[in-house]
Image (tube, helix red, strand yellow):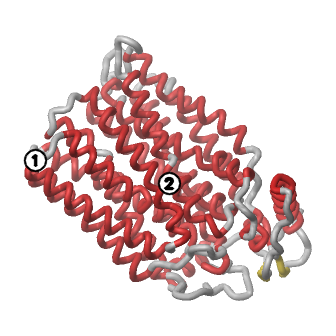
């Protein structure tokens, strides 16, 4: 129900931010964040089982066709992010995180039933579209529901669940690649069917997640927003057996049905150009770093360390676990020491560690296990840096453009890192030259160094602050960002 008043005061954001961490928040994180587990599982299984798709008893794809399906998945993710990201801001968080999950679920299930190259490619494009749309809808919803005091660590951990899926995918690959246990013509179909089955279970969790009260307030649906927040408050107070702190302050809102695209442009390019440049640099650097370094690691192992293809998952598994452990350990410091310090240090440390690893790699003085240890250390730190890129673009823009902003930077990062980096590194690795791969690693390290400099220069001190104080809604009385060193 929409209220009649077009301008009103509300304390919805303040009520949400002053809540203590609770079982309700845990449920929200699980229901929303488990998607990244699916993404990690999807990417790992699809990449590892590509060889099975070339079997005549499977789809009989050529190497070019296998590559085309990977490109199709990335293209779908880019388009899905842009389309669904725009709709997230226009139609709401809940409608879109249900829609994008439905797209993913349907497309993944259909992939398991593919009958030729064309059908497989189409379903992979649609699967990518669903996953791309999830990035905007989920990051927006999580940040708008989580209390300000713990928003940084929670956002990092949610994004890091991708690596739990990657770890499961690595373990599953060991079984599915064993044709003595699972025939090739069944293994690849089973892999996609598993993803669809897990997605179906998540649908039931998602239906219990409310719409963002912050978004509802901007659309003038005050009563609905108040009912949601009141229900959350009652649940937390009942379980904690103590009264909640009184919310402090209000925000004055003027209702609009939607935000014109010209306002999106003005906000990102004219009002906050430095924040846009910061988001662009961070997202491109981490996307290149991961797609160039992590997702080509299997090729490095087989080419330079004589690791058999079926043993590669055993080397990937500890890296995936390191990627998840990093945000668990480092995440709290993003709320205590602050965003600027931690983003700068994690980007710089990731680049420095990669340089150290690259020097030993070029000298040929490390074994495959030693290389694994180097990369575990690298991605322990880099995982927090990569997640912080998504945290940054989610926090530093007004609520009306948050979803679309996330999707724009995700799309650019995916195009540069997801398409350009693997092509570049595949060529470097195929050369068989350690010097050429070394040069590629140095490039990745340099980009992370640039990201560190950008964070140090333009970073926003968003820790323990409400989203509205970091970037005031365009529909508030004061649309300019408040707070120390928070302009740009």
Q: Which residue is mark 2?
A: 328
* Dot placed on the residue nearer the N-terminal end, 2 or 1: 2
- For the point 60% across and 41% down, the residue is 103
Residues at discs 2 and 1 in contact (Cβ within 8 Å): no
Q: Residue at x 26, y 39 (%)?
A: 298
User: Circle 1 — which element?
Assistant: loop
From the viewer's perspective, is residue 204 above or below residue 94?
above
* Residue 126 seen in the current view: no
Distance (Cα) linking label 2 and label 1: 32 Å
Give the percent coordinates (x, y) of residue 71.
Answer: 37, 45
288 or 369: nearer the eye? 369
Instruction: Tell me the crowding category of disc 1: few under 14, some 14 to 19, or many 20 or more residues within 10 angstroms, Cα based.
Output: few
Q: What numbered label is drawn on residue 404?
A: none
Does residue 109 lie above or below 327 as drawn?
above
Residue 450 drawn at (x, y percent) = 31, 73
Of residues 467 and 284, the one nearer the viewer is 467
Q: Position of residue 456 (x, y in %)?
A: 39, 79
- Give the residue displayed 60% in from the left and 63% down from the top: 403
To which residue does mark 1 refer? 365
């Amino acid at each position: 129900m929409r209220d009649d008043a077009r301008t009103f005061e509300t304390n919805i954001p303040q009520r949400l931010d002053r809540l203590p961490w609770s079982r309700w928040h845990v449920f929200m994180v699980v229901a929303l964040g488990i998607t990244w587990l699916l993404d990690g599982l999807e990417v790992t299984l699809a990449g590892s089982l590509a060889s099975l798709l070339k079997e005549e008893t499977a789809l009989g794809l050529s190497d070019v066709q296998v590559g085309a399906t990977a490109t199709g998945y990335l293209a779908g993710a880019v388009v899905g992010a842009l389309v669904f990201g725009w709709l997230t801001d226009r139609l709401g968080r809940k409608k879109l995180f249900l829609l994008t999950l439905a797209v993913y679920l349907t497309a993944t299930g259909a992939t398991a039933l593919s009958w030729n190259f064309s059908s497989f490619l189409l379903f992979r494009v649609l699967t990518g579209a669903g996953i791309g749309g999830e990035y905007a809808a989920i990051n927006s919803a999580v940040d708008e529901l989580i209390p300000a005091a713990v928003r940084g660590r929670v956002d990092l951990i949610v994004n890091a669940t991708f690596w739990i899926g990657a770890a499961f995918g690595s373990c599953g690959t060991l079984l599915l690649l064993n044709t003595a246990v699972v025939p090739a013509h069944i293994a690849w179909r089973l892999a996609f069917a598993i993803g669809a089955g897990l997605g179906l279970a998540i649908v039931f969790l998602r239906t219990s997640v409310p719409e963002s009260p912050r978004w509802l307030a901007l659309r003038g649906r005050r009563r609905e927003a108040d009912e949601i927040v009141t229900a959350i408050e009652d649940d937390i107070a009942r379980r904690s057996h103590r009264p909640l702190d009184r919310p402090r302050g209000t925000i004055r809102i003027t209702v609009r049905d939607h935000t014109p695209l010209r306002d999106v442009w003005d906000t990102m390019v004219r009002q906050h150009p430095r924040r846009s440049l910061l988001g662009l640099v961070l997202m491109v650097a981490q996307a290149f770093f991961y797609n160039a370094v992590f997702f080509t690691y299997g090729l490095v192992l087989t080419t330079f360390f004589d690791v058999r293809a079926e043993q590669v998952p055993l080397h990937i598994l500890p890296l995936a676990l390191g990627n998840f452990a990093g945000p668990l350990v480092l995440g709290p410091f993003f709320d205590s020491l602050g965003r600027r310090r931690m983003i700068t240090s994690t980007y710089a440390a990731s680049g420095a560690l990669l340089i150290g690893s690259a020097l030993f790699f070029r000298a040929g003085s490390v074994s495959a296990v030693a290389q694994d240890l180097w990369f575990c250390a690298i991605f322990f730190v880099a995982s927090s840096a990569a997640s912080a890129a998504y945290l940054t673009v989610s926090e530093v823009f007004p609520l009306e453009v948050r979803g679309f902003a996330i999707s724009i930077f995700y799309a650019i990062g995916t195009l540069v890192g997801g398409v350009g980096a693997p092509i570049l590194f595949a060529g470097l690795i195929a050369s068989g030259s350690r010097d050429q791969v070394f040069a590629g690693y140095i490039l990745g390290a340099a980009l992370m160094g640039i990201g560190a400099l950008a964070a140090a220069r333009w970073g926003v001190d968003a820790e323990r602050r409400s989203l509205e104080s970091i970037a005031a809604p365009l529909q508030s009385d004061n649309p300019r960002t408040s707070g120390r060193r928070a302009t740009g």
